[in-house]
Image (cartoon, helix red, strand yellow):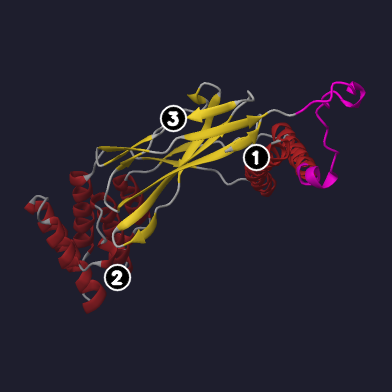
Amino acid sequence: MELLIGQQTKLMVSAIVNKDARVEFPSFQPLQMIVPGVEVVAQHDTDSSAVEDNMVRRIRIYTLTSFDGKLYYLPPMKVKVDGKTFTTNKLALKVVEVDVDTTNVDKFFPPKDVQDNPFQWADWSAAFWLSMLMLLLLAAVCWLYVQLRTGRSIVIPIKSIKRLLPHQKAMREIELIKRGNMTSSENSKEYYTRLTETLRKYIEERYGFRAMEMTSGEIIEKLTASQDSKDLDELRELFETADLVKFAKYSTLINENDRNLINAIDFINATKTDTPPQEETRPRLSDDDEREMKEQKLMKVAIIIISLVATGLLGMVIYLIYGNLA
């Protein structure tokens, strides 16, 4: 083999072996000397090729170089096949020096400096325009943020309102019935209708079931599990009388109306609870406040979206700049 000083050449070592054989070629580190003056630049294996029957050719190629002009003798290389050692032939490598005309030194030029690549607008235009768009978006974010901070703060007051207890509402309605002298009225149907509706509403709010949609018997049956039988007897008598008046045109006496009114009051007093519920209510905003709240929400959403887009553009600009500089 022959090469000019500083050039590279290939040294191929091959072995024809059984396809299942284990082959171990000599291995060198990069820039390791195979002999003094000859360096191994690199080594790599090629794909095996079939020869015949079950035989294949295994090949390893070594890239050699030398920087000293002389004739080198390369020793045989040892190749192990299934643990058995085989040797290659001896080789000679001649490194030829380059003749230099030292009489005409004026023809030699010094090394050139690193050449600057010419500026190509096409390579940087995408990064430039994306940067401009990103700056515009950031300016829009700043403007929206300033508008949001300088806008009028809307405070929504929350007021706690005490609700009347079920028995308080029922007693208020019974007072209205008493003030209207309905117990002595000839229109017993209207009296019992208002009285039973008052009791139904009270029972519905007090016990939490739909008493307004139930019959008198269903209400009594529902209350039987938790109420005193005497109270329920008086309530049952009141509902039965009311049903007779409303549906059978039954005529009642004044003392009977008074007794039923007292029974209703006794039932309410016997079953009332003193736990005062509270209800928080949010006053309705004016149209201007609602409009301003919507605008502020839109500004916040716009700031988030534009910030995300600007961040994505920044990533694209960095990627393009890195690609141009690489």
Determine the residue located farthest toward the left in the rendered image: 229
Q: Which residue is mark 3?
A: 75
Q: On the rendered structure, is 254 left or right of 51?
A: left
Give the structural element (helix, strand or loop) at label 2: helix
Identify the residue shown where x is 68% and y is 44%. 292
Identify whether 285 is placed above or below 204: above
Q: Which residue is mark 1?
A: 315
Question: In the rendering, which numbered label is found on residue 189?
Answer: 2
Which sits in the foreground, 192 or 322? 322
Give the structural element (helix, strand or loop) at label 1: helix
Query: Which amino acid lies under the numbered mark 1 shown in the image of this protein?
Result: Gly
Identify the residue shown where x is 57% and y is 38%. 1
Query: Which amino acid lies under the numbered mark 3 shown in the image of this protein?
Result: Pro
Identify the residue shown where x is 19% and y is 46%. 271
Please state the extent of the stretch shown in magenta in the rendering: 99-127
In the rendered image, residue 120 lying in the magenta stretch gets the answer yes
Q: CA–CA distance between discs 2 and 3?
A: 129 Å
Q: On the rendered structure, is 121 left or right of 315?
A: right
Is there CB contact under 8 Å for labels 1 and 2?
no
Q: Is residue 149 visible?
A: yes
Quarter of the rendering occupied by the C terminus = top right
Q: Position of residue 38 (x, y in %)?
A: 54, 26
Determine the residue located farthest toward the bottom in the rendered image: 248
Which sits in the foreground, 211 or 48? 48
Q: Earlier in the sequence, mark 1 or mark 2?
A: 2
Query: Which amino acid lies under the numbered mark 2 shown in the image of this protein?
Result: Lys
Q: Is residue 252 visible?
A: no
Give the structural element (helix, strand or loop) at label 3: loop
Quadrant of the image occupied by residue 93 = top right
Identify whether 86 is placed above or below 210: above
Quadrant of the image occupied by residue 133 = top right
Which sits in the foreground, 214 or 91? 91
